[in-house]
Amino acid sequence: MAISLKKGGSFNLTKKEPALKKMMIGLGWEMKSGNTLDLDASIFLLGNNGKLPVEEYFVFYNNLKSPDGSVQHTGDNRTGAGEGDDEMILANLDLINPNIKDVVITVSIHEAEARRHTFGMMQEAYIRIVDVDSNREILRYDLDAEFNGYTDMEFGRLRLEEDGWHFIASGIGSNIGLGGYVDMYA
Ligand SMILES: [Ca+2]
Ligand SMILES: [Ca+2]
């Protein structure tokens, strides 16, 4: 049974899922019409100051692996065609550089402004976290209904506290694009 979290809610991931080591962050979508829309999942690994230690800790379709080897993007999907997870990022909690304090997961629409795309144009769009070893879904968010009108969102973040990793279901929609997040964290 997946954990049901309200927007802004959080829980102690280490305590709740002590066996969790490898996570798969899966993004799936379909378009309502015959058009295609390109969603991108990205991860920002941030230090104590809330910034990327070096820019390679920003993992996305053009930088598939973090320097510590903890986060691996499996490759860009530009259409969302087909069922199930269309774009995936793997994260291994054991490999995260000890200087990393926050792992921010974002979803953004590629060239949303130029193409006039928003989350509301999709159907069956979701982002989820799966425990790779047990193949169990830990968390899922639907992107289409609640985030209608937005072009990007902070899905959630892992934060290292004294008692382990906490997951915060941020669910913060925005229209700043992937570049906006880069400006914020670089
Ligand atoms: Ca994509
Ligand atoms: Ca799909």
Image (spheres, helix red, strand yellow):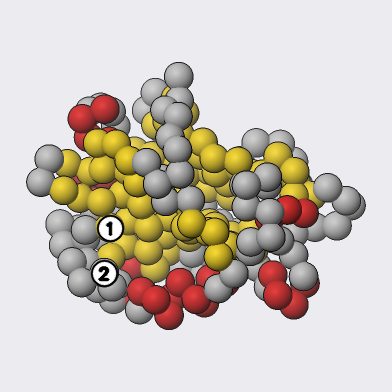
Residue drawn 15% across and 57% down?
98
Going from N to C along the chain, the mark reached first, 1 or 2, is 2
Q: Which quadrant does the C terminus fall into? A: bottom left
Tell me residue 25's x, y (percent).
47, 44
Disc 1 target residue: 102
Residue topped by disc 2? 50
Name the residue nearer the viewer: 158 or 146. 146
In the displayed image of the protein, which residue is found farthest to the right?
A: 34
Q: What residue is rendered at 70% in x and 75% in y?
A: 113
Characterize the local packing of mark 2: few (<14), some (14-19) or many (20 or more) Cα atoms within 10 angstroms.
some
The image position of residue 81, as x and y in percent, is: 76, 47
Q: Which amino acid is tagged 2?
A: Gly
Helix, strand or loop at disc 1? strand
Q: Is mark 1 within 8 Å of ligand 1?
A: no
**Mark 1 vs 2: CB contact within 8 A:** yes
Compared with residue 119, is residue 144 higher up or lower down, i.e. above or below? above
Camera-side residue: 160 or 132? 160
Choose between 93 and 169: the one closer to the eye. 169
**Residue 92 appears in view:** no
Q: Is residue 54 above or below residue 108?
A: below
Going by the numbered disc 1, the residue's amino acid type is Asp
Q: How many circles with numbers are drawn on the protein?
A: 2
Secondary structure at numbered mark 2: loop
In which image quadrant can residue 55 be found? bottom left
Quadrant of the image occupied by residue 46: bottom left
